[in-house]
Image: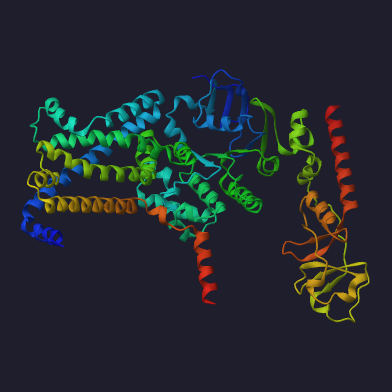
Amino acid sequence: MTSPEQSSGPLPMIRFNGITKTYDGGRPAVDDLSMDIDRGRITVFVGPSGCGKTTSLRMINRMVEPTSGTILLDGQDVALQKAAELRRSMGYVMQSSGLMPHRSVIDNIATVPRLNGVPRAEARVRAKELLDVVGLASELGRRYPGQLSGGQQQRVGVARALAADPPVLLMDEPFSAVDPVVRAELQEELLRLQRDLAKTIVFVTHDIDEATILGDKVAVFAVGGRLAQFAAPEEILRAPVDDFVAGFVGRDRGFRHLSFQQGDHVTVHPIETIEVDQLADPTVSVRSAWTLLVDADGRPHGWVPQATRGSITTQADAVPGGSLYTRGDTLRRALDAALSSPSGLGVAVDDDGRAIGIVRAAEVFELIEGARLDRGRADHNTAV
Amino acid sequence: MDWVQGIVEYIPANAALLRELTGNHLVQSILPIVFGVLIAVPLAQIARLNRPAGAAMLTASSLLYTIPSLAMFVFLPLVLGTSILSMVNVVVALTIYAVALLMRSTVDALNSIDDGVRQAAVAMGYTPLRRFLTVDLPLSVPVLIAGVRVISVTNISMVSVGALIGVPSLGRLFTDGLTRNYPEQIAVGILVTLLLALVLDLLLVLLERVLTPWTRATPARTARAAALEARTVAA
């Protein structure tokens, strides 16, 4: 047994050590991959198809055997462990959920504990708890997977992966087959779960947005199985290491990068409001060019332009509003609220959704500029 | 309508003989189905795991099926050392045919499983044997039973051939009816054979229903849509 001596920090959960995978003498699918995957964090493998990200993931639980190199799981060479037992020690979530169509939802979740010899009744009790953990109603447990929606099936897939409480979760494009709304829900749910569970998660996706939302660290793979950049998502968006990474993160990367800048300092200005109940009363006039329409609780419901005040008598007549900026959210949300608003004024709300004022795009830009200057100064200082 | 009356009278008059021959017939047709499945399933799995061997096995099984049954019935006692009148000959011969026919359909049945499910089973940490028995096999039941239903019908009809060399089965009603020029007996033989084939087929359909409850579970969305439709119609 040789102990890894690449780094002096705490032992990584998973270490790729010079891993190469070649199929039948062709070009390598994974080319000399060496990387450390942090304990208790989400590491995302992202890249175009054919970049070896899924192959790399599957080498961790030996669904694919490397041509050369070693993978250490908690310091132990995975090649020396029994494949079936190794796989049971990690959770696995896949794209099509891969649930057993002939087993009830409960029995699907109980799969790995059952394989480990846990009695059926005990495994089912734990499986019922997990339904709740992933946000599914307990009566769904008796159904067959075919009776669930795509999003529900993915939740069951996550519950099944968690059933034996493994320290490592491997997730192979788990959310790519569901619609964008459900995907966003599942992503948020995963982050919520991860705050409680702190698993070591390796997550494969081809979607750079998903990678930057979920990843504590992101590994960008290039075609040919080369690891192009491995860094925090903020750094990948701000400072892509080469043209490939810059091209892959895309044209919107500047805008996306705003997701990593907190908007605590955005100024919220007061705004004139009119209540829904007052609309029908023609004596209630508006003074500003754009007046915010709110309900009795103060929640925004669109805009009333001064020019057409006379023709707006019900909530349905109002001009629909843009996205909302919750105080303390990122600069990306603040800017989007302003840009998507018909009045050019972004509506800011508190945590209960009540309107507290507006933000202006120009001021958000000033903050972005200020942050850029600060960063430049910091970089300069460290360089000296 | 004399012959109808002849048939109706034949049955109670020969009830004991009919019962005995039907019993023999059933034993000779059902046992080969059971043995056939037990042999064909592992062979099919071997054929799937090893492509070249599989191709050879499938060709061999097709060739086996071209051996005429009568030749097989006469030839087998020499190999097995059984009496020429023994039912064992028929059971062995029909088992060989069953395996020959089931090989291909069982390979198809095992291939009918969604690859994602198989991959998931591997990823969950199933051992190969356990995966085969608890995932692959149950999921292949619908296609497997389709193949078995074909075997059951061919077996029921082929067992009769054994009567030519004297092995007791419903086929005796044909050989006997022919030599005695007794068409009512032949007709009864055909009727009972048909009935057996139907009953056996029905049992196989029931077996499939019992083994595959998940295939009839209505998708949640469809159920909701159906409820909605019902409400619309009621309104």
| In this rendering, position of residue A178 left or right of residue A138 | right
| In this rendering, position of residue B188 left or right of residue A28 | left
Query: Residue placed farthest to the top in the image?
Result: A25
Q: Relative to A302, does residue A68 appear above or below in the rendering? A: above
Estimate the x, y position of residue B63 in percent, counting from the top left.
30, 28
| In this rendering, position of residue A192 left or right of residue A348 | left
Estimate the x, y position of residue A11 in percent, counting from the top left.
57, 30
Q: How many marks?
A: 0
> Which of the two residues, A44 or A260, is positioned nearer the viewer here?
A44
Place residue B140 in its image quadrant. Answer: top left
| Residue at horizontal 17 percent and vertical 42 percent from the top | B160
| In this rendering, position of residue B53 left or right of residue A282 | left
> Which of the two residues, A303 or A163, is positioned nearer the viewer here?
A303
Q: Relative to A31, does residue B13 appear above or below in the rendering? A: below
> Which of the two residues, A5 or A362, is positioned nearer the viewer here?
A362
> Which of the two residues, A1 or A261, is positioned nearer the viewer here?
A261
Q: Can residue B113 be seen in this view?
A: yes
Q: In which quarter of the image is the C terminus of chain A?
A: top right
Estimate the x, y position of residue A323 in percent, counting from the top left.
78, 58
Place residue A18 in its image quadrant. Answer: top right
Q: Relative to B220, does residue B227 appear above or below in the rendering? A: below
Q: Relative to B67, does residue A301 appear above or below in the rendering? A: below
Q: Can residue A11 be seen in this view?
A: no
Estimate the x, y position of residue A371 in percent, counting from the top left.
85, 43
Place residue A37 in its image quadrant. Answer: top right
Q: What colouring method underlies this structural image?
A: rainbow
